[in-house]
């Protein structure tokens, strides 16, 4: 199992349109600092499980037959907009698994095309894709939202976006499972009264409480990038600010764990 960040930005992405802050100017000048819509993929052989579908060029990124399943965290536009052109393609049906949300997004349910929408299995109940155990867990957001715990038998990755904190039952479940890697929503620098998304404070608290070997911050705004660029804020040694296209190999995680 190989995990890759496809996008690590929030809905505005980085650079943010019209913004001239140092983080946005840096991203315009150096493409490695750009952040697309928050999304990821898990690859097994030549097959891919997509986690969210915010990129609108999925039809170019993934040749016909290479998308096994799409897992959705929720139905906000920045996480599903890539499904709108994909649905009008030709070929085999692509399963799309997501939270039980009767509204979905726009007319996706009414006109699914080649997409086959399925509700996620019962929360905290594992299912299997490409030999990987996947367990959906509830998150705190403004629409029904789930995170996913992936386990390939060697290592485990918890993918937790979009959320503000964690529900108690999710926190207790993950503390018991002890994932090797936690990928967590971290949308803004510290600020009072956050809504729907973690600030840096909440994200670091969650990582500390789950005690993974590695924590990755994602769903990042240009405000957080600017804050980290301008302020000498010490992140814990096991915490990394994720980058678009960055890859994680659970085989390497297994070796690291063994050593």
Image (cartoon, rainbow, N blue to C red):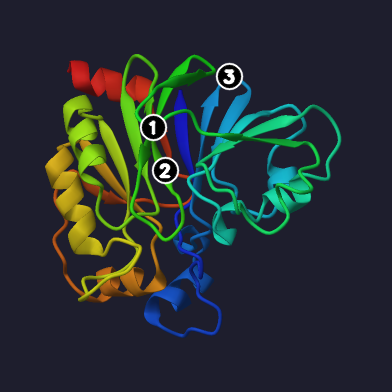
Closer to the camera in the image, 219 or 103? 103
Say which residue appears at 69% left-offset and 28% top-offset: 66
Q: Secondary structure at mark 3?
A: loop
Closer to the camera in the image, 232 or 56? 56
Eye-nearest disc, 3 or 1: 1
Instruction: Determine whether, in the image, residue 230 is placed left or right of residue 21.
Output: left
Q: Residues within 10 Å of mark 3 (few under 14, many from 20)?
A: few
List x then y, in percent, for residue 259.
17, 18
Instruction: Determine whether, in the image, residue 78 is placed left or right of residue 23.
Output: right
Residue corresponding to mark 2:
146
Q: Secondary structure at mark 2?
A: strand
Do the residues bearing badges 1 and 2 touch, measured as CB atoms within 8 Å?
yes
Residue corresponding to mark 3:
45
Q: How many marks?
A: 3
Do the residues bearing badges 3 and 1 touch, measured as CB atoms within 8 Å?
no
Say which residue appears at 18% left-offset and 62% top-offset: 201
How far apart are labels 3 and 2 at the CA level? 26 Å
How far apart are labels 1 and 2 at the CA level? 8 Å
Say which residue appears at 59% left-offset and 29% top-offset: 48
Residue corresponding to mark 1:
123
Instruction: Determine whether, in the image, residue 178 is placed left or right of residue 68.
Output: left
């Amino acid at each position: 199992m190989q995990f890759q960040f496809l996008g690590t930005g929030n809905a505005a992405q980085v650079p943010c349109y019209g913004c001239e802050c140092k983080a946005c100017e840096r991203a315009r000048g150096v493409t490695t600092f750009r952040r697309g819509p928050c999304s990821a993929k898990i690859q097994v052989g030549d097959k891919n499980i997509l986690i969210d579908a915010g990129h609108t060029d999925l039809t170019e990124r993934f040749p016909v037959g290479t998308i096994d399943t799409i897992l959705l965290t929720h139905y906000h536009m920045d996480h599903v907009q890539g499904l709108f052109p994909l649905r009008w393609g030709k070929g085999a049906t692509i399963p799309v698994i997501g939270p039980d949300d009767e509204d979905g997004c726009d007319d996706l349910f009414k006109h699914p095309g080649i997409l086959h929408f399925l509700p996620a299995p019962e929360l905290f109940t594992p299912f299997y894709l490409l030999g990987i155990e996947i367990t959906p867990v509830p998150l705190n957001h403004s629409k029904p939202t789930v995170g996913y715990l992936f386990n390939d038998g060697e290592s485990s990755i918890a993918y937790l976006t979009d959320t503000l904190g964690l529900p108690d039952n999710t926190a207790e479940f993950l503390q018991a499972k002890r994932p090797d890697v936690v990928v967590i929503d971290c949308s803004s620098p510290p600020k009072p009264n956050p809504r729907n998304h973690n600030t840096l404070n909440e994200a670091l608290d969650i990582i500390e409480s789950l005690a993974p070997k590695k924590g990755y911050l994602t769903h990042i705004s240009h405000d957080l990038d600017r804050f980290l660029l301008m302020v000498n804020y010490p992140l814990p040694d096991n915490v990394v600010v994720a980058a678009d296209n960055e890859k994680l190999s659970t085989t390497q995680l297994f070796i690291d764990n063994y050593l």
